[in-house]
Amino acid sequence: MRRVLIANRGEIAVRIAKACRAAGIETVAVYSDADADALHVRAADVAVRIGPDSPAESYLSIPALLAAARETGADALHPGYGFLSERAALARACDEAGVTFIGPPADAIERMGSKIGARELMRAANVPIVPGDTPDDQSDPGVHAAARRLGYPVLVKASAGGGGKGMRRVDSDEDAVEAIAAARREAAAAFGDGTLYVERLIDRPRHVEIQILADAHGNVVHLFERECSIQRRHQKIVEESPSVAVSAGLRARMGDAAVAAARAAGYRNAGTIEFLVEGEGEAARFYFLEMNTRLQVEHPVTEAVTGIDLVLAQLRIAGGEPLPWRQEQLTQRGHAIECRIYAEDPASGFLPQAGPLLLYREPSGPGIRVDSGVREGDRIGVNYDPLLAKLVVAGETRDEAVARAIAALRAYPILGIRTNVGFLARLLAHDAFRSGALHTGLVDTLAQELSATPPLPEEVLVAAAMTSRAARGTTAPAGAEPAADDPWHALGAWGR
């Protein structure tokens, strides 16, 4: 493997470029018109334009990506996450073009891409699954009958895709008709597949996932768990490892189940088995939710507690090397937390934001890592996911990691657009988070409380007034325009 084309953008493209550089491998960045001056373009050795702003005509275009690989002589392709990372068509097209796909085989992606098919595969492999019903009659009345057989409350879910799309809670017969129709419409629009199934609703579960690595020599290991229960709109915003709810015995059982799932799927490279966990400790029960056939956004959490570079491991596996460790050689140390920094307004239902990054300064210090895809002066657009960066902190204990994360968030100034930085700091400081009593509905429960903007401290207001007065001069007449060096004036309309 000599040159890797990174078929992605933002922080993950920068992250992959760094791993390739450490391995002595050249990199090719691809970019749309919107990303011509993006950070990931500058992070690579070579950059190629692949299309206009629209993802469908750029990052989602397999012909454009393979044309870029041919043009630059790239002999491998890393899909990152999102975009085409879980599309079997990309893996298959790479194989046909003689380009190494740094990910699982196409048939494994297809096998695990159907949630209905994956459930049946896990059942055969004796991996626990959420009790449910997959009706042969896929009409709306057929799905309704399946929900009635299972007993309310249930979740109606799309067989394809993820991220909460095509999923609806149903509490009664009265809810079912509208919920099923809405789930099918959303699934068909998002994934081109309106197939639905029904699962028992598990009340206040934890979302815990297991990282796995599998090579082409029959070796599969797990790298322990990540707690991913802190979510908004079914999307994770805070992840940590280890989980306070997972005992040593439960960790071993979930790890064994994850390895069995990977073997059943004929898997290779990095992947994640996601579980719902009911209860805590040795008495807890866990159920297979889905498999992510790619690198996860939250992979740095696992890197922080295991010391293993997962992207480098991906490169080595794709190059045909066997895994260098046995399961008993892998250990966890300390505690790590990741906070996803989004351009969004928590007070407006986490509405994505767009605009210029007038000020952007990342925190630093012992145990602090920031994986970023932006820099000060960039303009955040509306074409792509609003993730700006990932703040990852590590400490010897969970309390130390939480305190370090809060301090880092408070030292993370971003001006020009609204972000969730303040929301995350308040969330981590909340008693519900500190206690470890996490569940997938916690953010919904606390959203209004955490979204309230606290008043500025009195000393900030005094300092601003004094600074502004000094900049104006003491004799400035009432109503006069601010002086050019007034810091509030320098921020333009935002400062007013």
Image (spheres, helix red, strand yellow):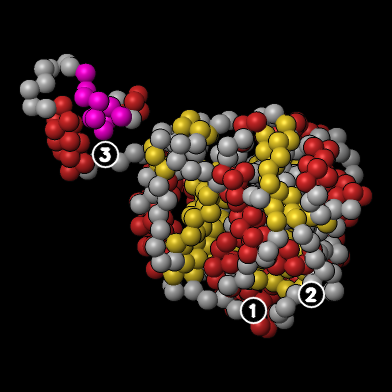
The residue lying toward the viewer, choosing from 399 and 107, is 107
Residue 455: which numbered mark, if any? 3
Q: Going 82% across and 40% down the picture, which residue do you hit?
A: 67
Amino acid at dot 1 = Leu
Amino acid at dot 3 = Pro
Circle 3/circle 2 CB separation < 8 Å: no
State the residue position of label 1.
330
Picture layout, residue 332 above or below residue 111: below
- Where residue 178 appears, x then y in whole percent? 70, 30
Query: Is 238 one of the magenta-colored residues?
Result: no
The residue lying toward the viewer, choosing from 304 and 260, is 304
* Label 1 element class: loop
Residue 378 placement, left or right of 307: left
Q: CA distance from mark 1 to mark 3?
A: 47 Å
Quadrant showing the N terminus: bottom right
Query: Is 487 one of the magenta-colored residues?
Result: yes
The residue lying toward the viewer, choosing from 56 and 225, is 56
Task: Give the mark nearest the N terminus, 2 or 1.
Answer: 2
- Where residue 25 appears, x then y in whole percent? 70, 60
Residue 95 placement, left or right of 6: right
Amino acid at dot 2 = Pro
Q: Examine the image and state in which quarter residue 287 appears.
A: bottom right
Circle 2/circle 1 CB separation < 8 Å: no
State the residue position of label 2.
322
- Where residue 181 appears, x then y in whole percent? 75, 31
* Label 3 element class: loop
Task: Give the mark nearest the N terminus, 3 or 2.
Answer: 2
Q: CA distance from mark 2 to mark 1?
A: 15 Å
Where does the magenta region start and end? 481-490
- Where residue 12 appears, x then y in whole percent? 62, 51
